[in-house]
Amino acid sequence: MSYWDGRKDLNYYRVVREWLEQLDHSSIIDVGCADTPIVTWGNFQRRTAVNHREFPLLHGVDCIEADWMETELQADVITCLQVIEHFETDFLREFVSKIFQSCQVAIISVPYLWPAGSCPGHHQDPIDVRKFLDLMNREPVKLEIVTDSSCQRLIALFESE
């Protein structure tokens, strides 16, 4: 089973899709996409998916295997879902700063209040709203906490300052 197959029915994806479908912009980048089709949602003319590991090609999408920090990509909208919790704080701040500098709208999600050590590779757990806002260093336009069975995720939409 692929990453996407095990997650495609999660509620937080439904919220992200609704938010993307309400936007009126021409380009989107999904950073850290794995094998998900998030970049195909919404009404965008130019679509780019970036992942640091090999991932399946998506029809109508420029799929780039690269380190986000080493790209010069820009788009109107950037999504970055369930990625930044994997980074140490200093790198995380650089990573999201590059996202905010590269778009007009950013949608970012993280695990919400997952216990420390419950998911290997997560350096930021637990993340509450205050910690998330401190890490982002800005206030979102929208913020929603979504429940999927026993897990919660925080999703936020930011607009350029």
Image (spheres, grey):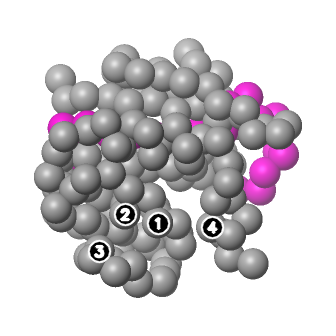
Say if mark 4 contacts mark 1, CB within 8 Å: yes
Q: In the image, is residue 81 part of the stretch drawn in magenta?
A: no
Numbered range of the magenta stretch: 102-121
Q: Which residue is mark 3?
A: 61
Q: Are marks 1 and 2 in contact (CB under 8 Å)?
A: yes
Residue 37 is tagged as: 1
Identify the main secondary structure in magenta.
loop
Q: Secondary structure at mark 3?
A: loop
The answer to whether 110 appears left or right of 48 in the picture is right
Query: Tag 2: residue type?
Result: Thr
Of residues 8 and 35, which is closer to you in this image?
8
Q: Is residue 59 above or below residue 22?
A: below
- Mark carried by residue 40: 2
Secondary structure under the numbered disc 4 in the rendered image? loop
**Could you tell me if the residues under marks 3 and 2 are in contact, i.e. CB atoms within 8 Å?**
yes
Q: Position of residue 17 (x, y in %)?
A: 45, 46
